[in-house]
């Protein structure tokens, strides 16, 4: 490729990135915040409603049961009807339900609302991962996926202080508790963004009027060349593929680690002696801020070296080490926060790097089903993780045993990644 051709291609992908990624990133920040803000609500909600840690753990995790059952059909629908309408539908319904969490009064209503929130959000994340394969070939996808998935740490950087501030400032206004105001005010943006997605997102390259003919032709050519090397396999073959199941187990391990941190980080920080909700929120933003930078650097390195497996394995092992050190240094706030920062950064770096593995060989409807299957099975750990940590906390009166459990699971996932053939994914 000549220098002029390479410059034109790079400029075209920059143009696509500026058009798509800011909107998708903001959507993911709001999506992830609405999923895990229950961790901040817990600081007030449990006392107000008389819930135990176990009730909280079940409610936090039951989200993923609804998510599990509706993930695959949701992604297949998106592949057939287009991302614009389906992502907009997802966002509007989850925004309404997230705001509706303010009306929870009993364990049953807590469980039902969290389950319905999982049903509403099912398909958003794997839908975006699938959507990015319509625009980017695999050799450009790790960095762009990392950029999109910085929505997770950004939701922590923004959402932690925001949730803490809302709960502190609005507590008691209009007769509502701070956690009720938090659910309401953080649910509304999802509804607004759903409308924006419907108005501005393009389903595919061919629908993008903002591309020139030359730019669209280049993008279509690159995607066609990559898809020519893949086989659009049947749903039955996808669901029985040993490779897909291996990836689901690996992803389960990493997701278990991140949700263990996401749902319990405010509690861990509070246990250090920091009681004010705003201070807890500000402290929780620190690990996520470092993680956002680390994700971008690791994604850039993976694309530059065209290497995927070790860019998953090493961060996974560092995440496990950080969780162990957070227990060992629990009595020293500075060292404990450094360990939690290492853990959060390591775990979060595994996630975008992981998605470069299945998207390297899945295509078409098989990609829609395979990505959704891996994501839905992996996210079952979102139910098991807070439940296991909550159970161990009630049993031992400490989160230490839970952190050891999560670190062990992360090590398993990191090592299993090396079982994926390098020739398949290092492209």
Image (tube, rainbow, N blue to C red):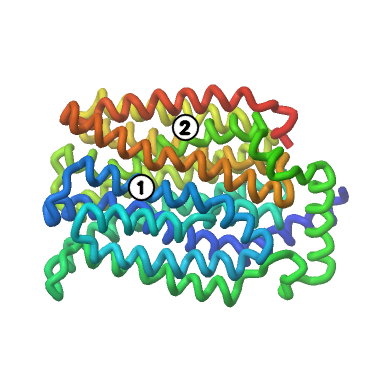
Viewed as shown, does residue 160 lie left or right of 397? right
Spot occupied by residue 267 in the image (x, y as percentages of width and height): 22, 42
**Total label count?**
2
Mark 1: few/some/many CA within 10 Å (<14, 14-19, 20+): many
Spot occupied by residue 418 in the image (x, y as percentages of width and height): 61, 23
Q: Is residue 397 above or below residue 90?
A: above
Whichever of callouts 1 and 2 sits on the residue coming sooner in the sequence is 1
Q: Is residue 171 above or below residue 49?
A: below
Question: At 31% from the left edge and 44% from the top edge, which residue is drawn?
Answer: 263
Question: At 26% from the left edge and 55% from the top edge, which residue is drawn?
Answer: 110
Q: Is residue 417 above or below residue 46?
A: above
Question: At 12% from the left edge and 51% from the top edge, which residue is drawn?
Answer: 50
| Picture quarter with the C terminus | top right
Question: At 43% from the left edge and 26% from the top edge, which residue is drawn?
Answer: 409
- In terms of depth relative to the viewer, which is nearer, 399 or 107? 107
Q: Is residue 68 above or below residue 168?
A: above
Residue to which mark 2 is pinned: 253
Viewed as shown, does residue 426 lie left or right of 272? right
Q: Which mark is residue 317?
A: none
Residue furthest to the right in view is 2
Residue 205, image quadrant:
bottom right
Secondary structure under tag 1 reads helix
Spot occupied by residue 238 in the image (x, y as percentages of width and height): 68, 40
Q: Which mark is residue 62?
A: 1
């Amino acid at each position: 490729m000549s220098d002029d051709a390479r410059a034109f291609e790079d400029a075209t992908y920059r143009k696509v990135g500026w058009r798509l990624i800011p909107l998708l990133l903001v959507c993911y920040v709001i999506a992830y915040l609405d999923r895990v803000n229950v961790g901040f609500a817990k600081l007030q909600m449990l006392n107000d409603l008389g819930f135990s840690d176990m009730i909280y753990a079940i409610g936090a995790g039951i989200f993923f049961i609804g998510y599990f059952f509706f993930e695959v059909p949701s992604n297949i629908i998106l592949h057939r009807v287009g991302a614009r309408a389906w992502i907009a539908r997802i966002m509007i319904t989850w925004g309404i339900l997230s705001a509706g969490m303010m009306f929870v009064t009993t364990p049953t209503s807590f469980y039902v609302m969290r389950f319905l929130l999982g049903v509403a959000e099912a398909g958003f994340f794997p839908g975006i991962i699938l959507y990015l394969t319509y625009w980017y070939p695999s050799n450009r996808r790790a960095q762009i996926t990392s950029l999109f998935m910085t929505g997770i740490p950004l939701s922590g950087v923004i959402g932690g202080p925001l949730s803490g501030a809302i709960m502190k400032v609005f507590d008691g206004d209009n007769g509502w508790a701070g956690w009720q105001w938090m659910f309401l005010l953080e649910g509304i943006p999802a509804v607004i963004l759903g409308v924006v997605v419907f108005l501005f997102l393009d389903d595919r390259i061919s629908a993008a009027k903002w591309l020139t003919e030359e730019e669209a032709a280049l993008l279509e050519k690159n995607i066609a060349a990559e898809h020519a090397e893949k086989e659009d396999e049947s749903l039955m073959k996808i669901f029985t593929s040993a490779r897909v199941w291996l990836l689901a187990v690996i992803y389960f391990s990493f997701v278990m680690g991140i949700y263990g941190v996401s749902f319990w980080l405010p509690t861990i920080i509070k246990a250090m002696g920091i009681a004010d909700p705003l201070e807890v929120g500000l402290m929780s933003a620190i690990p996520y801020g470092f993680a956002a930078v680390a994700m971008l650097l690791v994604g850039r390195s993976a694309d530059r070296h065209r290497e995927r497996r070790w860019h998953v394995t090493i961060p996974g092992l560092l995440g496990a080490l950080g969780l162990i050190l957070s227990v060992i240094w629990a009595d020293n706030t500075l060292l404990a926060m450094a360990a939690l920062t290492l853990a959060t950064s390591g775990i979060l770096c595994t996630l975008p790097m992981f998605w470069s593995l299945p998207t390297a060989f899945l295509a078409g409807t098989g990609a829609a089903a395979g990505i959704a299957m891996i994501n839905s099975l992996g996210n079952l750990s979102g139910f098991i993780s807070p439940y296991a940590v909550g159970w161990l906390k009630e049993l031992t009166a400490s989160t230490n045993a839970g952190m050891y459990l999560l670190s062990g699971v992360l090590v398993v996932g990191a090592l299993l990644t090396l079982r994926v053939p390098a020739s398949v994914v290092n492209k």
